[in-house]
Image (cartoon, grey):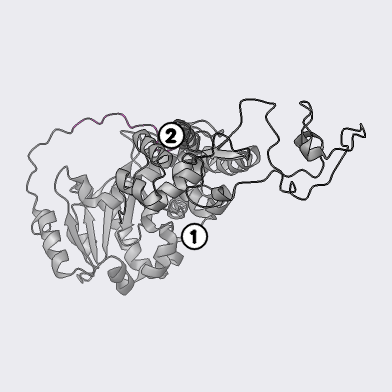
C-alpha cells in the first residue's frame, strides 16, 4: 500500500487516471502507477466525473424503470390503441409526454469505477452515462482552488456588523486589533489574520492608517556611541552585576524604571516603573528631571506602601545611567539606612536590556506623541493614562491585561494606594482624545 505524498494531483496524474479507467484498471493499480492512495483515486473520480449528453436530440427514449410493466396507451390523443412504449413516431418520446416517466440508471455506476470509460457498451447504451475526463477534472479543480481563496466569505449584513464594532474602537479610541479581538472574537466571527486582510482590502471604514503599526516606522538614525565615564554610583551595579545577581536570585521579580520626556527643553517628565512579571506600569509626573524629584517619588512610595510592602514589590530595579538616577543609595535605603531594594544600571546605548519598559512607553506615545508638551498634565491625567494603558489586553499576556495579571501576581495594596482601576474593554482609549 502506498501512503501517498500528501500533495495535490497534477494534470499528468489525472491523464494517467483517465488512461487507467479506459483500460479497466482497478483503483489500486492506478494508485501504484502515480504514487497515490487508492482512496484518493476513488474520491477524484467520484468528485470530478460528469454526465455526458448525447449529441443528437432525437435519439431513442432512454429506458424507463417502468418499461417492462408499462401498459399506457394513446398519450398522443389519437386513439391509435398502440402502447406508447413501442410507438415509433419520430416526434413522440415518452420522456416528453409521460407523467410517470423515470429514467433508469445503470447499476454499475453505483460501484467502482463509477464511470463508463472502460465499458464496452458505452457507445450503444441508452442510459445516462458518466465519464472521467482529465482536462475537465483539472479545470474544475483549478477553478475551485482559486475561487475558494478569493473574495470575502461574508454577507453584507455580517460585514456591517463587524464594521460597527471596529470603527468606534479602532478609529475613535485607537485600540489595538489584539485588544479588540480579545473582547469581541465571537462577534467578529473570523480570525485575526482575516481581519487584517479585510482592513487592508478596505472592506471596512477602518484603514491601515488607523492601526498603530500597520504603517512602517521611518528609519531611525543610528546613535553615535561615545565612551561612557565610569561613575562611582554604578560600581558593582552594572548590567553584568545584575545578571550575576539574578542568577543567584532567579525567583525575584524585576522592576524596570525610566523617564519619558515631553517637549524638548520643557521641565515636566513622567517617571515610569514596569513590573516584568505582569507588564503593569506605574506613572508619576515630575516637575523636573532631577535626582531630587526621583528620590521624592521613592520616598512617597516607601511612605504609602510601608517598608515591607515596598521591599516585596520592588526587590530589584533596573534602569539606565541617566543623571537623574545617580542617587542610588537614596533610592535603595530608608531614612534610617535600612536597604529595601537594589538598583542596577543598563549598559550605555543598550535600551533593549530593559525592553519591557521601552515597549510600554509606546502606549504613552499613542496618547502623547513624541515631542508634544507635558505642560498641561497633572497627576490625575497621568493616572487616567496609566489606567487605560494597564487595561488593554495584550497578546503577550495571553489576551489578558496587565491590570488583571497584577491582581494575581502583586501585593494588591499598591492598587489602592495608587488609584489603579480597571477600565471596561470597550472604553479603553489610547489616543490624544483621551485627555481632551
Residue for badge 2: 134
Image depth: mark 2 or mark 1 in front: 2
Nearer to us in this view, 224 or 21: 21
Crowdedness of circle 1 by 10 Å Cα count: few (<14), some, many (20+)? Answer: some
Quadrant location, the N terminus: bottom left
From the top left corner, tell me how far across and down residue 15 is, in percent: 38, 35
Most common SS among magenta residues: loop
Mark 1: secondary structure: loop
- Residue 154 location, x and y as percent? 58, 40
Between residues 178 and 287, which one lies in front from this camera angle? 178
Front residue (pair 238, 331): 238
Instruction: Let me know if residue 394 appears in the view.
Output: yes
Q: Which mark is residue 369?
A: none
Magenta residues (range): 211-222
Label 2 and label 1: CA atoms lie apart by 66 Å
> Is 418 rendered above or below residue 55?
below
Q: Is residue 289 left or right of residue 182?
A: left
Residue 193: x and y in percent read 44, 43
In this orientation, does residue 430 appear? no
Question: Magenta includes 213?
Answer: yes
Vertical order, 427 against 139 (above or below): below
Q: On the picture, is 225 further left or further right than 5?
A: left
The crowd level at tag 2 (other Cα within 10 Å; few <14, some 14-19, many 20+) is many
Residue 335: give x, y in percent of width and height: 24, 68
Q: Residue at left 50%, top 40%?
A: 120
Q: Earlier in the sequence, mark 2 or mark 1?
A: 2
Task: Give the residue drawn at x 73%, y 45%.
Answer: 102
Quarter of the image for residue 125 reads top right
Taking the magenta stretch, the answer to whether it contains residue 413 is no
Helix, strand or loop at disc 2?
helix
Extreme residue toward the bottom, this view: 308
Q: Which residue is mark 1?
A: 421
Amino acid at each position: 500500500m502506498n501512503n501517498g505524498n500528501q500533495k495535490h494531483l497534477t494534470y499528468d496524474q489525472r491523464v494517467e487516471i483517465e488512461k487507467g479507467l479506459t483500460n479497466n484498471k482497478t483503483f489500486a493499480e492506478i494508485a501504484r502507477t502515480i504514487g497515490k492512495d487508492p482512496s484518493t483515486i476513488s474520491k477524484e473520480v467520484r468528485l470530478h466525473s460528469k454526465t455526458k449528453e448525447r449529441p443528437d436530440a432525437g435519439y431513442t427514449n432512454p429506458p424507463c424503470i417502468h418499461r417492462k410493466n408499462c401498459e399506457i396507451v394513446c398519450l398522443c390523443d389519437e386513439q391509435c390503441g398502440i402502447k406508447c412504449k413501442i410507438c415509433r413516431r419520430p416526434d413522440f418520446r415518452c420522456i416528453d409526454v409521460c407523467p410517470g416517466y423515470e429514467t433508469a440508471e445503470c447499476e454499475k455506476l453505483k460501484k467502482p469505477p463509477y464511470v463508463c470509460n472502460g465499458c464496452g457498451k458505452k457507445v450503444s447504451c441508452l442510459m445516462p452515462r458518466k465519464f472521467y475526463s482529465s482536462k475537465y477534472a483539472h479545470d474544475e479543480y483549478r477553478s475551485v482552488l482559486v475561487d475558494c481563496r478569493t473574495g470575502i466569505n461574508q454577507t453584507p449584513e455580517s460585514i456591517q456588523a463587524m464594521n460597527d464594532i471596529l470603527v468606534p474602537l479602532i478609529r475613535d479610541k485607537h485600540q489595538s486589533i489584539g485588544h479588540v479581538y480579545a473582547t469581541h472574537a465571537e462577534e467578529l466571527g473570523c480570525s485575526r489574520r482575516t481581519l487584517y486582510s479585510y482592513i487592508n482590502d478596505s472592506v471596512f471604514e477602518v484603514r491601515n492608517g488607523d492601526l498603530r503599526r500597520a504603517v512602517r516606522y521611518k528609519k531611525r538614525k543610528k546613535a553615535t556611541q561615545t565612551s561612557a565615564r565610569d561613575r562611582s554610583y554604578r560600581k558593582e551595579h552594572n548590567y553584568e552585576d545584575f545578571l550575576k545577581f539574578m542568577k543567584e536570585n532567579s525567583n525575584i521579580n524585576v522592576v524596570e524604571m525610566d523617564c519619558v520626556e515631553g517637549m524638548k527643553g520643557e521641565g515636566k517628565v513622567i517617571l515610569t516603573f514596569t513590573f516584568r512579571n505582569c507588564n503593569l506600569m506605574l506613572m508619576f509626573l515630575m516637575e523636573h528631571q532631577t535626582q531630587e524629584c526621583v528620590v521624592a517619588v521613592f520616598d512617597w512610595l516607601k511612605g504609602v506602601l510601608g517598608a515591607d510592602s515596598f521591599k516585596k514589590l520592588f526587590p530589584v530595579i533596573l534602569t539606565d545611567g541617566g543623571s537623574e538616577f545617580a542617587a542610588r543609595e537614596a533610592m535603595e535605603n530608608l531614612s534610617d539606612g535600612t536597604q529595601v531594594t537594589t538598583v542596577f544600571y543598563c549598559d550605555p546605548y543598550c535600551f533593549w536590556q530593559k525592553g519591557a519598559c521601552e515597549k510600554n512607553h509606546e502606549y504613552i506615545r499613542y496618547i502623547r506623541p513624541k515631542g508634544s508638551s507635558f505642560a498641561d498634565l497633572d497627576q490625575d491625567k497621568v493616572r487616567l493614562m496609566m489606567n487605560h494603558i494597564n487595561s488593554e489586553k495584550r497578546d503577550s499576556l495571553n489576551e489578558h491585561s496587565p491590570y488583571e495579571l497584577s491582581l494575581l501576581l502583586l501585593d494588591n495594596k499598591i492598587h489602592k494606594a495608587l488609584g489603579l482601576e480597571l477600565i471596561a474593554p470597550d472604553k479603553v482609549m489610547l489616543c490624544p482624545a483621551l485627555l481632551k
